[in-house]
């Protein structure tokens, strides 16, 4: 194994040396390409991300309508989310591998068309079995979108704008989570849940046409063409030889435990702990997290790009700072808090975490080869999805043993462990930078 690790390190050193050389030419490149279509692509992907998360979250807003119309049990409703998550996790590595071997813009459009058609087909569901099958199909249709979208953003943007573009995309995701639930609930009350899914699917087909017209491959990928000839297993094996990628992905997986636990259980926490109504509890939890996510992702992306001009390891430094500062915030749940103070605490925690969201994706893209980014992001999605499910189960287990406040406070330890993983990523990046600077020009 040792020669393989050395070979991977050497490849990283050469690639990083090329990036350092490219940075010296950055002012000329920036002036010449400022009017490139990269921002048009970024804006279109903002709306695609919003629709992606709107479609996957819309079903929870019409649970009462589904229960009465299809006579579903609570276990069937729980299975709607679980089946989607499992199929999405299973398909993510394959979706990423396809995006590395085909035109990423085409993979994105095909994924958008497929999940929009599945949304329209969902309106024809006649019972629990057909609904669960269609939700599994939705997970498989959507799994190729995020790896292809993030790889496209990385293709179009250099280190000066990469995290900013990712931050804009993450804002679209959070807008979709809130907007999708609101639109689905509103339409469901007016035209029924079946018409709801038809409208959302139709919106997706229109957006797919826009993406087909506007979204293009990145400049370097257009020049080089599609070069991937290696198998998926070979690419995955290569990822395990890149310590920066492994440590950043491990930190993200740990954070997925916390993020999905909070998203899933905070409404119930507000309802039981503060005796709030269901609507008020849902709004208190989602509004505090999503508003902080929008602010943090966009501003954090800009900050990350400014820092990256002084070296790629500064992105990881920002990640360490945000994670280490967020961990103690969750310990405040051990104190007697009012509902309003709890909302403020959640806002502060989410803001700290989202300030590093753009750096996380950009750091993963910069830790692997350009033609391997979508595969790396697919594996990243797989790990996060599995960790999310374990986090949801683990949190409710702690709640049954110790109560809500202790269960949420225990998540601070997971965030702290994520920060420790990022310290290891910083050390690995520092070693690569030092070796790259010693290579002859």
Image: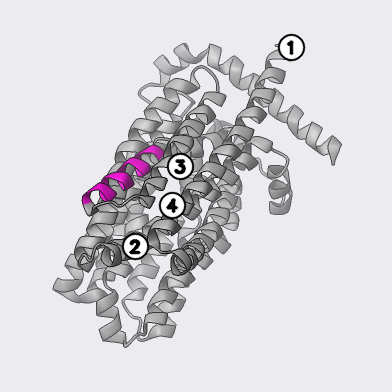
Give 359 or 271, whichever is nearer the viewer.
271
Q: Which residue is tagged 3? A: 327
Q: Nearer the viewer, mark 2 or mark 4?
A: 4
Q: Is there a contact, CB below 8 Å, between mark 2 and mark 4?
A: no
Q: Which residue is tagged 1? A: 440
State the CA–CA distance, disc 4 to disc 3: 9 Å
Q: Is there a contact, CB below 8 Å, between mark 2 and mark 1?
A: no
**Which numbered disc, 2 or 3, marks the residue that appears first in the sequence?**
2
Which x, y percent locates residue 433?
65, 21
**Which numbered disc, 2 or 1, marks the residue that appears first in the sequence?**
2
Q: Residues within 10 Å of mark 1 (few under 14, many from 20)?
A: few
At numbered mark 2, what does the secondary structure look like: helix, strand or loop? Answer: helix
**Which numbered disc, 3 or 1, marks the residue that appears first in the sequence?**
3
**Which numbered disc, 4 or 3, marks the residue that appears first in the sequence?**
3
Q: Is residue 117 visible?
A: yes
Q: Residues within 10 Å of mark 3 (few under 14, many from 20)?
A: many
Viewport quadrant of the C terminus: top right
Q: Is residue 145 above or below residue 31?
A: below
Which x, y percent locates residue 54?
32, 58
Q: Quadrant of residue 216?
A: top left
Magenta extent: 340-352
At numbered mark 3, what does the secondary structure look like: helix, strand or loop? Answer: helix
At numbered mark 4, what does the secondary structure look like: helix, strand or loop? Answer: helix
At numbered mark 1, what does the secondary structure look like: helix, strand or loop? Answer: loop
Q: Is residue 46 left or right of residue 14?
A: left
Q: Residues within 10 Å of mark 4 (few under 14, many from 20)?
A: some
**Looking at the rendered structure, which numbered label has been put on residue 57?**
2
Q: Which residue is tagged 4? A: 409
* Residue 346 lies in the magenta-colored region: yes
Q: Is residue 178 visible?
A: no
């Amino acid at each position: 194994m040792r020669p393989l690790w050395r070979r991977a390190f050497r490849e990283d050193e050469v690639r990083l040396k090329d990036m350092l050389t490219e940075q010296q030419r950055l002012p000329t490149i920036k002036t010449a390409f400022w009017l490139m279509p990269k921002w048009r692509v970024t804006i279109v992907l903002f709306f695609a991300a919003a629709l992606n998360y709107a479609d996957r979250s819309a079903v929870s807003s019409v649970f009462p309508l589904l229960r009465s119309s299809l006579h579903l049990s609570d276990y069937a409703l729980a299975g709607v989310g679980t089946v989607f998550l499992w199929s999405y996790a299973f398909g993510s590595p394959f979706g990423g591998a396809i995006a590395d071997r085909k035109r990423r813009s085409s993979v994105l459009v095909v994924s958008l068309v497929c999940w929009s058609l599945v949304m329209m087909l969902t309106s024809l569901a006649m019972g629990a079995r057909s609904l669960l099958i269609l939700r599994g199909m939705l997970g498989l249709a959507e799994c190729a979108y995020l790896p292809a979208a993030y790889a496209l953003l990385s293709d179009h943007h250099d280190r000066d704008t990469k995290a900013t573009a990712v931050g804009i995309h993450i804002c679209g995701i959070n807008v979709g989570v809130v907007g999708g639930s609101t639109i689905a609930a509103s339409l469901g009350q007016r035209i029924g849940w079946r018409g709801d899914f038809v409208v959302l699917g139709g919106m997706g087909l229109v957006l797919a046409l826009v993406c087909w017209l506007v979204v293009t491959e990145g400049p370097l990928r257009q020049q080089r063409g599609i070069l991937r000839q290696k198998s998926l297993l070979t690419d995955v094996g290569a990822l395990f030889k890149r310590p920066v990628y492994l440590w950043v992905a491990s930190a993200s997986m740990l954070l997925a435990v916390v993020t999905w636990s909070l998203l899933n259980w905070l409404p119930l926490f507000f309802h039981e702990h503060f005796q709030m109504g269901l609507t008020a509890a849902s709004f208190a939890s989602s509004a505090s997290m999503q508003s902080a996510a929008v602010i943090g992702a966009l501003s954090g992306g800009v900050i990350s790009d400014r820092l990256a001009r002084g070296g790629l390891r500064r992105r990881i430094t920002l990640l360490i700072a945000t994670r280490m500062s967020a961990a103690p915030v969750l310990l405040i749940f051990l104190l007697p808090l009012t509902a309003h103070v709890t909302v403020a605490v959640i806002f502060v925690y989410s803001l700290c975490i989202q300030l590093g969201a753009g750096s996380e994706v950009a750091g993963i893209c910069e830790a692997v080869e350009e033609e391997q980014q979508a595969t790396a992001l697919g594996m990243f999605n797989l790990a996060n999805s599995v960790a999310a499910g374990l986090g949801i189960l683990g949190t409710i287990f702690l709640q049954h043993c110790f109560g809500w406040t202790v269960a949420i406070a225990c998540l601070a330890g997971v965030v702290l462990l994520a920060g420790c993983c990022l310290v290891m990523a910083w050390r690995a990046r520092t070693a690569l930078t030092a070796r790259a600077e010693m290579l002859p020009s």
